[in-house]
Amino acid sequence: MLLLKKPWINYVWQSGIATIAMFLVSLALTMEHAVIVSSIASTAFIVFTMPKSITATPRRVIGGHIVGLLCGGFASFISNLFYLSPLFMYSFSVGLAIFVMVVTDTEHPPAAGTALGVALSGLSIKILISVVSSVIILAIIHRILQPFLKDLI
């Protein structure tokens, strides 16, 4: 038996809004960038199921993913420049992103996935625009709907 906390309508409409947001993200990013799409999906989960969480704030959503983009891009660049082990650089991109997020107070766990995805695929203008626009869309939706969003967990 499925047990929903009251009010159950929030489960339905918040999941619906997350679906629409992810559809918009999917228009920008293809499955070629599956790791990055997964990190944005994880962000959508946080924004729409735990909207009162500190990790759902626009500063952390946008800032965390920008840090992930930059750290993943840096790792990819360094790996290509010095022919370093890809496995080391993928790990380095995540560790560096965690460090920079903590230092800049932009901690957002899914953004570590963005760092890994960018380290895997390389940083391109398409990825940059897609990720930034995706997280801005999620942050705007969160900001506008915040009075109506309830923590579902």
Image (cartoon, rainbow, N blue to C red):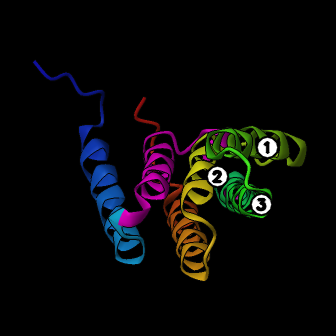
Residue at 48% x, 61% y is: 145
Q: Most prominent secondary structure in the magenta stretch?
A: helix
What residue does disc 3 label?
74
Q: Residue furthest front?
A: 83
The correct choice, above or below, for 66 with respect to 44 in the image is below
Magenta range is: 32-58
Q: Amino acid at mark 2?
A: Ala
Q: Is residue 35 magenta?
A: yes
Residue at image x 63%, y 47%? 86
Q: Which residue is mark 1?
A: 96
- Callout 3–callout 2 Cβ contact below 8 Å: no
The residue lying at 36 percent from left, 70 percent from top is 30
Q: Position of residue 134 (x, y in %)?
A: 51, 69
Q: Are marks 1 and 3 in contact (CB under 8 Å)?
A: yes
Spot occupied by residue 14 in the image (x, y as percentages of width and height): 34, 51
The answer to whether residue 71 is left or right of residue 34 is right
Give the residue type at disc 1. Leu
Classify 10 Å Cα crowding around label 1: few (below 14), some (14-19), many (20 and above). Answer: many
Disc 1 secondary structure class: helix
| Cβ atoms under marks 2 and 1 closer than 8 Å | yes
In the image, 43 versus 149, the foreground residue is 43
Image coordinates of residue 102 in percent, x first then y, are 83, 39
User: Residue 36: image x %, image y %?
Assistant: 49, 57
